[in-house]
Amino acid sequence: MRALMAIGVIGLVCPNVAQAGEPITLFDFTQGTHGWVAAHAVENLRSTSEGLEFDCVGDDPYIWCGPVSQLPLGCRVTLTIRMRSDADPSGQVFYGRQFSAGNAVSFTVRDDGRWHEYEVLLPPQEAGGRLRIDPAGGKGRIAIAWIRATAIRPLLPPDVTPPRIADLGTAPATVQAGDLVVAHGGRQWDQYALRVAGQEMAQSHARLRLGVLVDGEPTYVEYGGAPCQLTRDADGRMRVIARMLDAAGGRWELSREFAPRDDGAISVQTRITVDRARDIFHLPMITLVAGLGTFGEEKTQAVLPGVEYLENEPSSSEADVRGAQAVRRMVDPYKLCFPMMSLVANGRYVGLAWERQDGLAPLFDSPDRVFGSGGHVLGLWLPGVGDGRLENELAAYRPFPLAAHAPLTSTVTLFGGRGESIAPAVAQYVRLRGGLPPVPEFTGGFEGAVRLLAHGWLDSAGHQDGTWRHAVWGTSFPAQPAADAPGYMLWLAEHAHDVALAERLRAGAARGLERLSPASSWEARVAHVARPFAPLLFGQIEPYAQRRLAAATQALRAFDAQGLVRYRARPSGPDYGSTHWEDHANGLSAAQLEPMLETAVFTGDQALSQAALELLDKQLNTYRNTVPRGAQTWEIPLHTPDILGSGRILSCCNLAYLLTADPKYLEAARYWAWTGASMVYLDPPTSGPVGLYATTAVLGATNWVAPFWIGLPVQWCGLVYRSALQDLARLDPEMGPLWQQLASGITRSGLQQTFPIEDQERQGLLPDFFHLKAQQSDGPAISPGTVQANLAEAYGKTP
């Protein structure tokens, strides 16, 4: 991740958005410039027969205009921009009377020099608003043919009828699987509760209504409270059927089957039919209210993987991101690392899982501010986001058709169990899916990976005569001698089938070693993953160990009596601790402890080992069953959940287990491994080939505003976590294969995201981030070592 790129993403890029009203052409640039001017790093702006053409001549180019009189006011607006670019994928639209990072929407540009149309969703606009377009992040040629606007208005206000505590009677019908029980009252369609280990955890919302168009007019029909019939099967299944009429005489049948599974979960299959064709704008397939009438708004933890990771605190808060993007109650499903949501309270967890391809919109609000129930809402609604419903909007803008007698079905899995954190819930989700998904196949396999990374070390702009850049990004990250690069290159040379390429790798490694002055340390590196292999390969072990020991002894001073590192804001920078309830976090403390423990393992120094282990024990006690956070406070708030935090403290636990063989460290390592797994894509987010095992780095934004990282994988952070997983796989005799598969998947996803050989400047380099929908790598191009650190294990080779 980086602090360099100022991309604002307050709003949504929304292809195929539900639209109301006719498009208005705001600007036809074949008829003139219409007051648009070159504002920064733009030259030769002119109107031609193809549109507004101009050259981007530097970093952060943009154009702007004065107040837009025809822009629809008081409602959401979709801007459609027809544009051609050969620059780069980074695009933005700023809006409002004053331009700021908080009033901007980013979109991914197809920089192939062809015409494309981009739809950008803006929040409600006010009179006097202006527009600014940043068509690229750097140099290139741009043309914009026209800009159109479409007003977006809901069909009806959302149905937010509050729930009532269900009266299930004295002897409700039940279905049980392990600790989970579904109890149904048998009188109304949505009249059931979920119990876990003898305690009620959630109830269904029985007062929701169905939204349909009757004679072309939107209306709500009673749905959740429809009278029903309940039957039981000998195998433990329970079926509930309800029938009802809409205002125009349409006959609806609602059928739901609760079936126990052998893995401790209950499958819920819902089937809805109507005898006449209908257009539906609101269909709550399942809506649960956790804590209703029991533990209320309190909780221990909750998770919406890749979007929310909460302790006893509100979802959709501004602790990690400010403005419109803070609202995450109904996100675009591609942002979810896997389709699951869960909540923990009173030593138990409850959750639901579903199939992404069913197109359901996930509703998650903790505590519940949608209905004001006094609990927490977990639901799945239709239409899905993008199919008539805007992200985070409860009201729909366009109906979807249901043909006569054509069943609409969905399958949701309810699960629950004992636990003090979301870790058991994530583990159960993996078991429900039959284990982790297969690791991705990288085109060309192992041989292709060796070739690609070799060209990254040798032929990309990251290599300069035996020195390497940490990343290629403008003039940032200058080249430097690096001790890790020669080691990685020599390993690739041993595995390259191309003899000439292998010789070039050996020669490049030799030149890299020449550029390392004898007085310099082996600590110099360009990869994010730090491994002390240079002295073991190239000598000078004793001086290296002495330097490491001296540095580790000095670093002891950073920890207080509680074994923690306290966050201190820089005098001239933002206070990243301002939105956290503490001045410390596990990621911040573990990041400084990890090299100390590694030094203790490397040197065998008993005094350092004892001191480092005492610090770790204090940290594990303080951070037991907490959320990983605070590992990137150079740009990310201390509070923000962070996969890098998982990786840092997991590595500390691994190293402690190596030093002591104490099983408490292995158990702690497993916990922190599961925390990071919640931020790994364990289900394909799109139909594109890249996405599985990509990693969401942080659940927030740089400087609380932009870039907004949810749904925008940053693989280098996941690869650091991967390396700690790989170490755990060697240490854990019981769960080693699972950690190995998870680590290998993350490595291979990193290879998939790596810039191809055809990209001369960035070939073999890892992108800082990856656009899932556009399937496009972007941002600073990072040295190959971060991916390569565990390439061997990903392909069953010797490291």
Image (spheres, grey):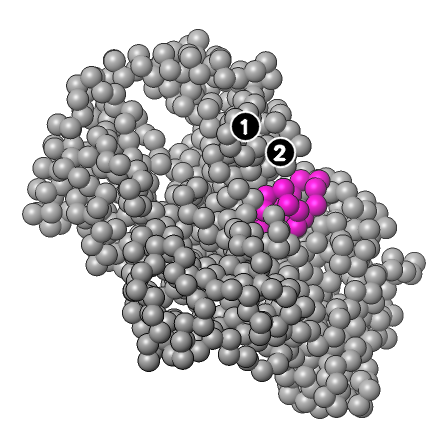
Mark 1 lies on a secondary structure that is loop
Amino acid on which disc 2 is placed: Ser
Who's the residue at 75% across and 90% down the image?
215
What's the magenta region? 303-321
Who's the residue at 48% across and 49% down the image?
707
Query: In this image, 362 relative to 89: left or right?
Result: right
Give yes or no for residue 284 being in the magenta stretch. no
Q: Which residue is mark 2?
A: 578
Q: Is residue 95 above or below residue 471?
A: below
Q: Is residue 341 above or below residue 605?
A: below
Mark 2 lies on a secondary structure that is loop
Query: In this image, 767 relative to 297: left or right?
Result: left
Residue 194: tell me if it is visible.
no
Q: Which residue is mark 1?
A: 569
Residue 130, by quadrant, is: bottom right
Marks 1/2 in contact by CB < 8 Å: the verdict is yes
Residue 576, by quadrant, is: top right
Q: Nearer the viewer, residue 167 or 477?
A: 477
Percent from the top left, x then y, of residue 337? 52, 54
Q: CA distance from mark 1 to mark 2?
A: 9 Å
Seen from this angle, which residue lies furthest right?
170
Who's the residue at 59% across and 27% down the image?
584
First along the sequence among labels 1 and 2: 1
